[in-house]
Image (cartoon, grey):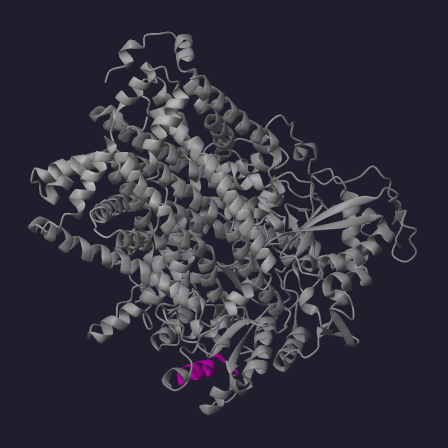
Amino acid sequence: MKIDKVNKKSFFQNFKRYRTMLLMLLPSVVLVFVFSYLPIGGLVMAFKRFNYSDGIWGSPWVGWDNFKFFLTSGKALSVTRNTALYNLAFIVVNTTLEIAFAIILSEMAGKWLKKITQSIIFLPYFISWVIVGSIAYGLLSYETGTLNGLLGSMGIDPVNFYGESGWWPLIIVAFSAWKGVGYGVVVYLAAILGVDGSLHEAAAIDGASIFQRIRYITLPGITSTVITLTLLALGKIFRGNLDLFYQLVGQNGALFDKTDVIDTYVFRMTIAATDVGQTVAIGFYQSVLCFITIIAANWLVKKKDENYSLF
Amino acid sequence: MKKGKKWLALMLVGVMSLSVLTGCGGDTPQDSSTQESTQESQVQESSSAVEESQAEDTGFSYNGQDVSKPVELVMYYIGDKPEDEDLVLAEINKILKEKINATLVLKSISFSDYNTKYALTIAGGESIDLIYTSTWAFYQTEATKGAFAEITDQVINDYMPLHKEYQSKASWGQAQIGGKVYFVPNNMANVSANAVLIRGDLREKYGLDKPKSIDDLEAYYEAVSNDPDSGVTFAYDASQNNDTSKLILLLAENNCGSVGGAVNNYFAYEYSDNVTPEDIFWIYGSDQYLAYANRMKTWADKGFWSKSAIANATDVKEAFLNGTSASYTQNLGSVGAVASEILKNHPEWQPEVYDVTPDADRFFLAYTGDGVAVLASSQNKERACMALDLLKFDEELYYLLRHGIRGVHYDIPEPGVWAAGEDMSRYPFGNGFSWGFKNMMYNMDRVDTFADQSEIGAIWNARALEGPLAAFSFDDTNVKNELANLQSVYTQYGPLLDLGLVDKVESTLAEFNKQAEAAGLEKILEEVKVQVAAYQESIK
Amino acid sequence: MSKTVKTAKSAVRTRRRPMSKDVICFKGIGYPLIFAAAALCLVPFLIVIGSSFTSESYIIRNGYSIWPGDWSLESYQTIFRSPMAIIRAYGVTIFVTVVGTVLSVFLNTMAGYVLQRKDFGWRNKFSFYYFFTTLFSGGLMPWYMLCVKYLHLKDSIWSMILPGLISVWNILLVKGFMGGIPYEMTESAKIDGAGDFSIFLRLIWPLSKPVVATIGLFTALMYWNDWYNSMLFINNSNLYSLQYQLYKLINDARELRRIAEESGIVVDSVPIESMKMALTVVVTGPIVLLYPFIQKYFVKGLTLGAVKG
């Protein structure tokens, strides 16, 4: 719908036309400005050596010094790559499961069964990663873990999960899915409910199978939501979830080659001597990478269909 | 639609006024930190060389300094507020008011939050005068940012006469950063060493003698592991690393000490009468470490601890108390306390504490493990210093803040010994507020300390020496990046090798060393040697 | 017209049609899949509940289990030892959650609505304005200094509400959902002379119940579970949020024990592991119990959302 073609008006004319809408945006714009834009000034600390008497603005510039510890470590590339790969895996696996479960739930008969199942799937959200770490240990430990106990009863040798990193990409993706899918199911379920029910009725009457209904009505109906959520997730693709990784992997060096992400790696490097400039510098590094990614992704989506892009 | 617009306007007004109510914008911030500078800790008052200050004070002068203006001092400590803190604080303030016309207000940063909140509290700009700090509580990081006021000789002369007289001279050297002192360390030199707690009942069951060496300890572990009816899960239920037992099994066994500061996990030197910078070596490249790592692998293979120990989050102490571990290694005080607890709950376990490296030299802990700093942004630096002086060296004040109210929280059954009072849990001994003021002069022993602990402690104290590098603290400014990289290499290999949880010790150790070299090990070692040489020059 | 559609639908639903092959296939795969997932999600939670009723020493010796091996109420006793503190914390959290959720949902949906208006030529610029803040941040220290030094939010209940009010994720989600509502409806309302705000309030909002319920749920959960803002800004123990109060309880107990041991004093051991579990139960309990009642808003949304003209 090309409404914009008519808008060859001047700034002030537009301002007058939009004034109610601008007013409606005003409170959130102000709040975002105060709580998010003002502190962005602190980014300069990535390039300074901060001290209290000079404050943020007066402290001396040190150029790229705060980045050196990370960039010269030899592992910068591999942990960056790990971070992105894990996040991509999370996006793909979680989204697939969320859509699948949402569809199944929406087609489920029995009001109470539906409600209870959906609530149960949501439960892991409430369990903190600290507890999940302990539960994982109870599951995977060598001598007393539940999994090895099960394997033993089937006559299989125990697996040293905490001693070999091979299993861990799978373990991490599994735990991340377990904890997060319930949340996404709520969103996709809402999206599915937003699809016009009469379309389904008409299709059913016309003899469409359930799979055909899903493929031609449900899925297209939620496409915009899928794209929105995926784009939002891509905007965080270079940020690792420190809680998740730290509670599951901890300080176990045997697993680092497969499980180190930027956040855990930097955390370990600076745990003895935190330096605020270095912390901000790494955050900045991650931000820039995310920025490039999302601009590219958004542009690609825009080319396909302008309505689906984020901005 | 007019109605809609009115609605909207009302709504927006509502939201906006909410923001105003919460003090949004419009305020010109008092950036007090830019007003003070770190050099400014001297005061305009002229100093007279008056020594005495304690006894007769009219409340209007202290050590010849005018205190006629009443002042409120705010102090932050790390810990949680005990129930009776206000009660005890009232008593403390009575004395402070009388002596230096000041009142103390206490605030705390919870131990669980201090990692995040410590720097933020200082940056937040509220008015603070004193704060607890130490080598593990961000002293170095914050001092370099200019958070603390410099404690010069002038300051000590003018405002802290008791410190001038009684505070250990060595402690000031330890507190230096770049030649300047930015906090007041404690005045307590304890021997720092670890001991082993084992199950006496199991030892007797296997017919073993009291362990006097590491081999004896190994025999005990082996007996426990081979006994399916031992009742414990592991001989030593290690958790995440082997740091505490490493101090005994590697360092004490080889009579080595580690270099202080950010590098204390990496470099050591063998004790002798004449330690030079050349004696300092990289722990993980040494033969001693290879021997240790091999032994740890043997122990791990024999099943002394779990193959998943690296991920085991259960504290060894809890494991021992609940009967899943047959031994516990920690510093003497902690080990003794656990032994006392076992005596109460499971006397049949017969807890016994041993020093399995009885021939090792023993040394005093650094004074910089606790201390108090004066904030550079404080408006009452002089009074804060005086308060610090009194809180540490005034006997009455010291007992109040360290033990509480006599008869309520503690009692003194005989001179030099104290016992827990009925209400001790309402103001527990050793709470966070008192850490910064630890003072050997007034320290008492606790009644019914575990017998082995007293015995071993006495032996150590009698033999203790000042470490050759005790006052040395490494300044990492020049090698920050290399250290960060070394740290990451260490965390990847160190704990696993310490726990013997690797397939091939030699090759893994070689890999560890290779990566350490790549991270800049040589440069760091050189820097350490240079700094140690300079330090030794300075104390000649 | 709407009523007829409704009755027609329910008529279709209640007519017992024999299940066709495709439905059997779908349900044959789908149901086991989702029930298996539900089991995987339920079991750990049962472990949490069970462990909260188990004695600490049993947990250390034997690990976690669903059925308490050694039944004990010690963790709950420790938590509720000072009931006033917990009750106060519940009060604080309820207030923060209700006020925060109402304000936040209102502001976020309003913003999302404006951003999806196809006739709003500046929507992409504003969308970027909002989105940019999720990419770049100055870090914890500048934000903290802003809140404490300049906004004076320390020890204020608003410190737990204001910073989280605007959620860009929610705004963009709402934008996506509302974008699905045909623009013709807005156009015809505008022709009728309706103002932008009343179109939002009277027309679009009622049609967006699913997404409003969704972000309402997420926002409420965020406020309910928050302990971070409490930790950073609140020193006054009367204003602690529920999560923070409980979290502090555990850490205080642990710390007390640590101090005592260092000075060689024997202090009763604290059931730390089971307390962590009990904490989860105490915080999550009210929500799990309330959730079934909230769910009906999702179902309601279905019916209304499906109605067209």
A97 in relation to C278, above or below: above
Please count the marks in the image: 0
Residue B216 among those drawn in magenta: yes
Q: Is residue B141 visible?
A: no
Image quarter in which the N terminus of chain B is found: top left
Residue found 66% across the figure and 68% down from its top:
B465
Q: Position of residue B263 (x, y in %)?
A: 51, 55
A221 in relation to B450, above or below: above
Q: Position of residue A78 (x, y in %)?
A: 31, 45
Q: Is residue B117 left or right of residue A297?
A: right
Foreground residue, C135 or B1? B1
Q: Is residue B51 visible?
A: yes
What residue range appears in magenta? B212-223
Residue found 88% across the figure and 43% down from its top:
B68
Q: Is residue B67 left or right of residue B468?
A: right
Q: Position of residue A212 (x, y in %)?
A: 10, 41
Foreground residue, C111 or C298? C298
Residue A281 among those drawn in magenta: no
